[in-house]
């Protein structure tokens, strides 16, 4: 007879007691075997995406932290949680890295937690000043801001707005494309409106542009904290995956902000973008001339842009 038939007898108390003992024994076995992550994953019974809230989101955030991806645990699936998910998906080689948590992503994350696997340490490690951090440092102490160059699109595909937008081959992002300090300086800020919550700003330490700022738009995550003194070629962030800030695809917007403006970021459209383009293009081709000769970021004089060089022989107005 079906279990719904009213004539079916109810389970005897002894059977009920044995069932409870069995559940308790299974729970203790899970804990004793170190498979606590299975319990953490249990509340997640739906696809999680941007805008979701609840205990299952909190469980997800906790698991992300357990694998070394720092995430706020508040039960709200906001943009930062989405970026953490994308970071995990990229590191776990899951495709697409959409920031949405389905069955495959959840199962892989649970496996990482169970096995004690973490985000690759090589990405998080901050090189010291005694470590060779780049093989492309020019004679002026400047380097191209992204590596490896084989995953960066060529200058013909770069575009200008406030800074210079530099895309990646096949939309490579995350630990695949690292952003590095172009020159020695100090990270003075992370997070720029419109450019993402982790976008770093580097204050240049020395040379013709000392005191000016370089901003790295659409980066996620940052690798070094605010206040870190960095050397040319030292990794400071990764190219953000997905929509980081006002962005539709992974890329770096690198921009130059003159200290005379009194702000760390940012400049008007095309105010300093041509000069920034000249710098990164020169570093791309192996030339050290531009960083060595520029005295200041493009200045705004009577509503016109100009670029001055040390020798005083080149000026655009």
Image: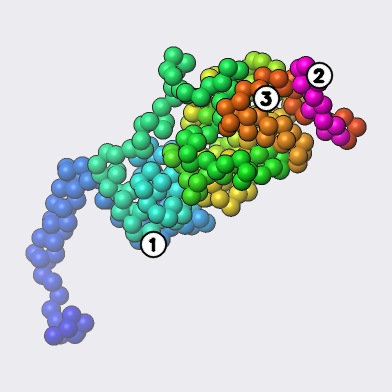
Q: Is residue 159 left or right of residue 223?
A: right
- Residue 237 at x, y percent in the picture: 51, 33
* Residue at which label 1 appears: 46
Whether residue 243 is in magenta: the answer is no
Secondary structure state at the residue bearing disc 2 = loop
- Residue 98 at x, y percent in the picture: 46, 54
Residue range of the region highlighted in magenta in the rendering: 304-317
Label annotation for residue 312: 2
Q: Tag 1 or tag 2, which sits nearer the N-term? A: 1
Residue 40 visible to an observer of this rendering: no
CA distance for labels 1 and 3: 54 Å
Q: Tag 2 or tag 3, which sits nearer the N-term? A: 3
Secondary structure state at the residue bearing disc 1 = loop
Please state which of the two labelled residues, at mark 2 or mark 1, is closer to the viewer. 2
* Residue at which label 3 appears: 290
Q: Which quadrant, please, contains the N terminus?
A: bottom left
Whether residue 305 is in magenta: the answer is yes
Quadrant position of residue 14: bottom left
Within 10 Å of the Cα at label 3, are there few (<14), some (14-19), or many (20+) other Cα atoms?
many
CA distance for labels 2 and 1: 65 Å
Does 278 appear above or below 87?
A: above
Which residue is located at x 69 percent, y 42 percent? 160
Which residue is located at x 29 percent, y 43 percent? 113
Does 64 appear above or below 14?
A: above
Closer to us: 65 or 19: 65
Label annotation for residue 3: none
Closer to us: 273 or 187: 273
Q: Is residue 228 left or right of residue 279?
A: left
Closer to us: 247 or 160: 160
Please state which of the two labelled residues, at mark 1 or mark 3, is closer to the viewer. 3
Which residue is located at x 73 percent, y 35 percent? 274
- Residue 241 at x, y percent in the picture: 50, 46
């Amino acid at each position: 007879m079906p279990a719904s038939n009213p004539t079916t007898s109810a389970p005897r108390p002894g059977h009920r007691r044995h069932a409870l003992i069995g559940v308790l024994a299974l729970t203790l076995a899970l804990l004793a075997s170190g498979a606590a992550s299975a319990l953490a994953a249990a509340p997640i019974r739906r696809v999680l995406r941007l805008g979701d809230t609840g205990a299952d989101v909190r469980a997800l955030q906790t698991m992300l932290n357990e694998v070394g991806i720092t995430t706020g645990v508040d039960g709200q699936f906001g943009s930062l949680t989405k970026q953490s998910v994308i970071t995990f998906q990229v590191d776990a080689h899951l495709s697409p890295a959409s920031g949405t948590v389905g069955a495959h992503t959840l199962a892989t994350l649970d496996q990482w937690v169970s096995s004690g696997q973490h985000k690759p340490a090589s990405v998080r490690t901050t090189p010291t000043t005694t470590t060779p951090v780049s093989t492309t440092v020019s004679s002026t102490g400047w380097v191209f801001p992204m590596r490896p160059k084989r995953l960066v699109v060529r200058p013909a595909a770069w575009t200008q707005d406030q800074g210079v937008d530099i895309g990646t081959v096949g939309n490579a992002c995350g630990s695949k494309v690292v952003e590095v300090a172009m020159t020695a300086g100090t990270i003075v800020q992370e997070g720029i409106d419109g450019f993402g919550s982790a976008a770093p700003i580097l204050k240049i330490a020395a040379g013709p542009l000392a005191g000016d700022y370089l901003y790295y738009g659409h980066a996620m995550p940052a690798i070094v904290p605010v206040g870190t003194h960095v050397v040319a070629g030292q990794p400071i962030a990764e190219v953000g995956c997905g929509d980081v800030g006002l962005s539709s695809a992974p890329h770096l917007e690198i921009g130059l902000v003159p200290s005379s403006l009194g702000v760390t970021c940012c400049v008007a459209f095309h105010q300093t973008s041509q000069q920034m383009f000249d710098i990164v293009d020169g570093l791309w081709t192996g030339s050290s001339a531009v960083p060595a000769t520029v005295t200041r970021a493009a200045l705004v004089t009577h509503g016109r842009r100009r670029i001055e060089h040390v020798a005083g022989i080149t000026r655009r107005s």
